[in-house]
Structure formats: structure tokens, C-alpha cells
């Protein structure tokens, strides 16, 4: 699995509509709060033209893309951190994802009620963010209580832990997400066990109406969300859940024609995947042989053994070397044999950093 994204937002902002459109999962999407109670899960293949080209060259028995898992989490409301609207249950679902996809409604509609009575995207964003901050604050305060008791042992470890908890608490009490806090790698590793919500990267999705898409004009709501995301130094994309739902009903040429008529260059799913990969620092590498051509997702900066471990843990532990050719060089050469002849197929060791588009064959012993 490439990554797991949790789709969050206030009730009636278009979360479930967008989820249904990109996953074709058929989750409930109605005009009332808490339509989604148990999280809906959809797994989506990551579209990658390189995979199709490799399939043409290799002619394998099977082609397997990498995938993203989307989790449609129920609409959060003010007081969720204290259990309002079944908040504790919903917050627990967010703890399990790699990244948060925060859907914000940026269009007026008489037909769709707003849980707050009027439209204000920044207020909506801050409502969700504050509930996540309050939930993290409760988690950290609990850690501090436990660590306080352990300080009596005099061990330096607990003193260091308490300093970190206080640092995080100060940030949260200033209404700042933990992801915006300057942390060492050691501190980040220590915080993993806390399962904090605000340490997760966030992608803001501004949900605009069909009219905004057709007119190709930005309204004041959209501009406000753009500015907010920029201040947070995070990613933001614009989609119309309504249009995505219509696109999901079409196939092939009809889908492309519909998007072309609207002047939409890429689907919401494509936008989500690109922004998600950038946000999480992910890349794709490939394995290719007679049995299968397959795409794999790893963190940017992963070594060859770490990439091999994505396939099987034995391959990482028993890693010997990797035979590597870039996608571009393989396509130009037309085959592995010709790539080897041209000196483009390389032998790489344990320190090799895998690059996006690398086609790899791992040698290992058990």
C-alpha cells in the first residue's frame, strides 16, 4: 500500500461525495450531519503511465499498480475532543492514517445546509484544527502525569521525556499544531508512540461549486483557504466534489471529453495523488519481469535495502545488491538486454538511494 489518507471536515462539506467520486465506493452522502458514522474505506490504484509503458516493453503476465487507501471519517464538530458528535470515536480513526485530507467547503448553496448556519471556510478549518489540538493536549497531559511519577527514579530518560512533553504542550496551548514545531529526529521518533493528530501532514482540499469551475474564477472563500495553507506551509488543491461525482459516472473518451469541455486538465484523484505524494515525500519505483510489472511506493531518500524491504522483509535482511536502470533509459533502450549493452543497467550496493522511476531487480540470500 502506498499511503493511507483520512478525509476529514465538518459535516456537509462534501467529504463523502468526494470520497465516493474518487473511490467509486458508494458510501452514504446525504444532506444531514453524521451521515458517515463508521469510516468508509476505499483503495484506489495510482494511475501511472510509466507502468503501462513498461508493460508494453516487458509483456508480463500481470501488471500491478501501487495504491492509496482513503478513509472517509465522519464529520467532526465543535466539542469533538470532549466526545461531542461521537468525537472520540472519530478522532481515533484519524490516528491510524498517514496524512489528513481536510475538505473545506468554498461555495454557497441554498440546497446544502451548513452545520454553523453560514459559510466561513477559515472558521471551519480552525474548528477542526482546534479539536485536533485539544485532543493532542489531553494525550500529552496524560503522558506528563505518567512521566511525573517516573521522575522519582532519577533516570535521565524521564527528565528528557518531560522536557519534550512540555515543549509540545506549550505549542498546543498556543494553538499551534505539532507538525509546525521544530523537532529533532530523536524527538519525532519519541513522539510516534503518542499517536498525535496534529503531527500528521495536512492537505487542504477546497471544494468549490460547478459554477466556479465553469467560470474559471476564484471566489473570496477559495482565496482565503489558499492564504491559510500558504501560512501553514502546506499543500492545497481545488476540486469540485459535484463534478468529480459526475466524472465518476463516465468512462474512457466520454470522461476525457467532459473534463475537456469544462477546461479541467486533471481529475480530482490525480490532483490528490500528486499533492499527497509531495506532502509525504513519496516516490515510485518499479520491478519488472515475465510474471509481473509492478509499482511500489517508498519514502524519498530510501536506500536500496529499504526499498527491497517493501517487497519482502527477507529481501531487506538478506540484501546483496540491486540491478538498477532508470525508467527513461529502459524505454529508450527498449529492453533490459539493450540497457545492459549500453551500460545503463547498473549494479548498486546497500548505500544506493532509490530514485523515482528506477526499475530494480534485487539480489538477496535468506
Image: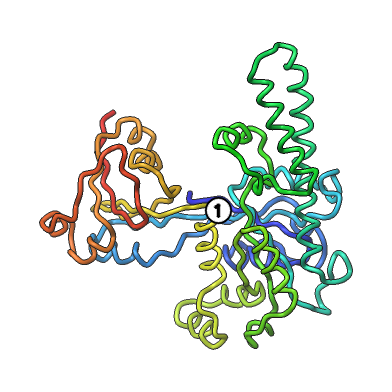
Q: Which residue is mark 1?
A: 69
**Residue 114: image location, x then y, percent:** 84, 68
Q: Is residue 215 left or right of residue 66?
A: right
Q: Residues within 10 Å of mark 1 (few under 14, many from 20)?
A: some
Specify the quadrant that holds the C terminus: top left
Against 334, residue 132 (above or below) is above
Picture quarter containing residue 25? bottom right
Numbered disc 1: secondary structure: strand
Which residue is located at x 82 percent, y 78 percent? Answer: 111
Q: Is residue 127 left or right of residue 96?
A: right
Which residue is located at x 54 percent, y 88 percent? Answer: 261
Q: Is residue 280 left or right of residue 30?
A: left
Which residue is located at x 62 percent, y 43 percent? Answer: 182
Against 43, residue 222 (above or below) is below
Q: Outermost residue, left direction?
A: 341
**Residue 284: image location, x then y, percent:** 40, 55
Amino acid at each position: 500500500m502506498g499511503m493511507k489518507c483520512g478525509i476529514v471536515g465538518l459535516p456537509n462539506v462534501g467529504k463523502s461525495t468526494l470520497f465516493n467520486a474518487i473511490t467509486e465506493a458508494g458510501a452514504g452522502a446525504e444532506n444531514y450531519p453524521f451521515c458517515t458514522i463508521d469510516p468508509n474505506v476505499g483503495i484506489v490504484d495510482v494511475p501511472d503511465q510509466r507502468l503501462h509503458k513498461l508493460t508494453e516493453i516487458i509483456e508480463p503476465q500481470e501488471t500491478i499498480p501501487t495504491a492509496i487507501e482513503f478513509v472517509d471519517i465522519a464529520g467532526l464538530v465543535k466539542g469533538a475532543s470532549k466526545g461531542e458528535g461521537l468525537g472520540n470515536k472519530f478522532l481515533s480513526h484519524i490516528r491510524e492514517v498517514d496524512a489528513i485530507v481536510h475538505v473545506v467547503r468554498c461555495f454557497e448553496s441554498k440546497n446544502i445546509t451548513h452545520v454553523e448556519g453560514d459559510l466561513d471556510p477559515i472558521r471551519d478549518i480552525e474548528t477542526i484544527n482546534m479539536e485536533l489540538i485539544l485532543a493532542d493536549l489531553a494525550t500529552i497531559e496524560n503522558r506528563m502525569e505518567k512521566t511525573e511519577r517516573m521522575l522519582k527514579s532519577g533516570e535521565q530518560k524521564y527528565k528528557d521525556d518531560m522536557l519534550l512533553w512540555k515543549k509540545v504542550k506549550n505549542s498546543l496551548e498556543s494553538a499551534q499544531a505539532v507538525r509546525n514545531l521544530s523537532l529533532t529526529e530523536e524527538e519525532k521518533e519519541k513522539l510516534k508512540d503518542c499517536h498525535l493528530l496534529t503531527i500528521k501532514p495536512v492537505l487542504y482540499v477546497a471544494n468549490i461549486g460547478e459554477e466556479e469551475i465553469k467560470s474559471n474564477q476564484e471566489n473570496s472563500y477559495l482565496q482565503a483557504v489558499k492564504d491559510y495553507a500558504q501560512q501553514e506551509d502546506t499543500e492545497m488543491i481545488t476540486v469540485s466534489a459535484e463534478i468529480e461525482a459526475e466524472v465518476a459516472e463516465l468512462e474512457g473518451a466520454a470522461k476525457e471529453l467532459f473534463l475537456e469541455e469544462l477546461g479541467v486538465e486533471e481529475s480530482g484523484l490525480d490532483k490528490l495523488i500528486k499533492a499527497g505524494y509531495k506532502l509525504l515525500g513519496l516516490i515510485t519505483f518499479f520491478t519488472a519481469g515475465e510474471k509481473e510489472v509492478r509499482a511500489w511506493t517508498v519514502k524519498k531518500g530510501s536506500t536500496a535495502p529499504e526499498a527491497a524491504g517493501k517487497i519482502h522483509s527477507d529481501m531487506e535482511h538478506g540484501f546483496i545488491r540491486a540491478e538498477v536502470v532508470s525508467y527513461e533509459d529502459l524505454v529508450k533502450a527498449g529492453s533490459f538486454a539493450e540497457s545492459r549493452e549500453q551500460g545503463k543497467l547498473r549494479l548498486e550496493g546497500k548505500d544506493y538511494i532509490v530514485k523515482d522511476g528506477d526499475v530494480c531487480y534485487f539480489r538477496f540470500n535468506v
